[in-house]
Amino acid sequence: MIKRKRISAHIYRAVIIMLFIILSFALLFTGCRIESISDSAFTSKTETAVLPDEEIIDKVPDSADTGSAETAIEADQEMIVSGFYKLLDAEAMPDELLEFVDKNVAYTVPDTMTLLLENLEYKQKSYIETATQYLFEGDAQQKLLDAFKNEAEFTPDNIEKIKDENLKADILKMFEGGFKFINLEGSYYPIIDFKYLKKYSSYLSIQYRDYLDVRAAESENVHSRDAGLTISWDELSQRMIKAEKYLDKYKAENPRKIEISRLFLLYFASYLYGQDNTPTRDWSTNAVYEEVLESYRDTVNENPSSKAAGILSNYLSELENSGYILTDDILNDIGKYLNEVINIYDLDSPYIILEQLKHLYYQSEHAVYGSVRLAGGSYSEYNEEGSQAVLTVTLSEFIAAGDLDGNGINDAAAVLIEEPAGEGTLYYLHAIYNGGPYIYSIANTFLGDSVKIKEISIKDGKIFIDMLMHKEDDPACCPTVEVKKTFKLDGYDLKEI
């Protein structure tokens, strides 16, 4: 298993930039643990466990008996899924998983392909940070910049431009694992190439095809970078409406809804607020640009059934009343429109909020740079040699959704367990703020060493904790004093009341 080592400052900066990418492209829904680099970031760990050749289904059984044929097909699906899970258990890399998918794709039914691609995506997302770390070790970035003048050149067809054979092999594995590369602030970063995954569309359900369509548009041309839009206002509107149509059509709560929800809110927020380098208004006068207003009007007129367009219409009316000037009152109140679409589509449901807790950044005084990012609810940090864990962090089962700041949108609270080497089992309460497209831990407080949490809840803007703490003669394993604590978020502090 690849182990996460303590990383240098320039690599850490790269990882922080990746936070932007992750917030823009995905949540990390995976149970896999990211660990650090060995000789090669994409070295196979499955020499004795790779199963694709064993698990290929030669053909779907042909039978005049429909019942027998259906039973045989069902058995085939079980074999395919079993083979894929064996690869996951053996820590196969994304390229190995895609190789398995390619060898079995003709024998799958849509439900099976959905399961395979969802798990593939989990693995891909969990690996992005490790791949990024690899690309910032040594002189890999400089070699990539020497090989490719821009990201348009950085394709599998041009792989021979990389002169370092080891780097070339690893980059090729990334491509074969469904990644592509974008340039942010003069460095190359891997992201999932959803357009690449569209080659499986004919084997997928309509819902999953629609999901890939929305995701592929973003991975093909990222809508924002360097604090500015890279697409027109009209294109931003079209992506927003397309994402909304997905949410309107598919209401089941699953990881795909979370992903599309985040993109939808990113588009909607960018459409209303603009970005630092692509503002909606003239900074000197606060007058909204005419091209922005025209795009707003077109969106409203062309999408009469869109709830987002209806909210935008109300915003336009407010702007019209102010002479199309973004007054302080409008700016201070603009968040209500974002909250309105969140409420309409239930984008702050407990499922959507709590599922994201498994993959967030959290503050940690024991981490080398003061924060950790969970993957599937856990994190491990190793020493320089990668031989010993110096910190593990785990999201406990004690999590809750509820409004902490009175804006009518669910936030969350979570208890994390930190185990720094030789320092006990430490429990921390985190308050998680829901900012629409982004949710993040905004404050935390220490609960105790080896305490036992019994219950956590949120009510009336307060976090309630029932727990057991130690009295003087209690053994470390077994606290006996029942304590009820109440906390309230106060700015960036979590205060006990």
Image: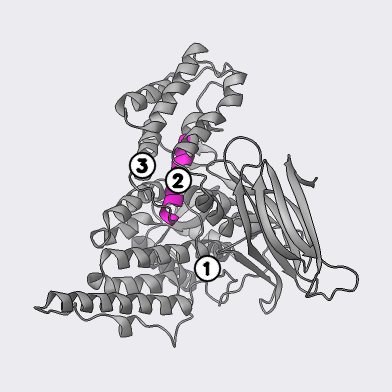
Residue sitting at the far bottom: 48
Question: Is residue 40 something one can see in this rendering?
Answer: yes
First-in-chain label (2 vs 1)? 1
Please, which colouring scheme is shown?
one colour
Q: Could you tell me the amino acid type at mark 3? A: Asp
Q: Could you tell me the amino acid type at mark 1? A: Gly
First-in-chain label (1 vs 3)? 1
| Residue 257 within the segment the image draws in magenta | yes
Q: Which residue occupies the foreground of this view, 82 or 382?
A: 82
| Residue 131 within the segment the image draws in magenta | no
Counting from the top left corner in percent of width and height, residue 133 is at: 58, 63
Q: Which residue is mark 1?
A: 31
Counting from the top left corner in percent of width and height, residue 326 is at: 55, 19
Quadrant hosting residue 47? bottom left
* Badge nearest the viewer, 3 or 2: 3
Q: Could you tell me the amino acid type at mark 2? A: Ser
Which element is circle 3 on? Answer: helix
User: From the viewer's perspective, is residue 174 above or below residue 437?
Assistant: below
User: From the viewer's perspective, is residue 65 above or below residue 294?
Assistant: below
Does residue 427 appear left or right of residue 403 in this picture? right
Q: Residues within 10 Å of mark 2 (few under 14, many from 20)?
A: many
Residue 261's tag is 2
Which element is circle 1 on? Answer: loop
Does residue 49 appear left or right of residue 16 in this picture? left
Q: Which residues are magenta?
A: 255-268
Counting from the top left corner in percent of width and height, residue 284 is at: 59, 18
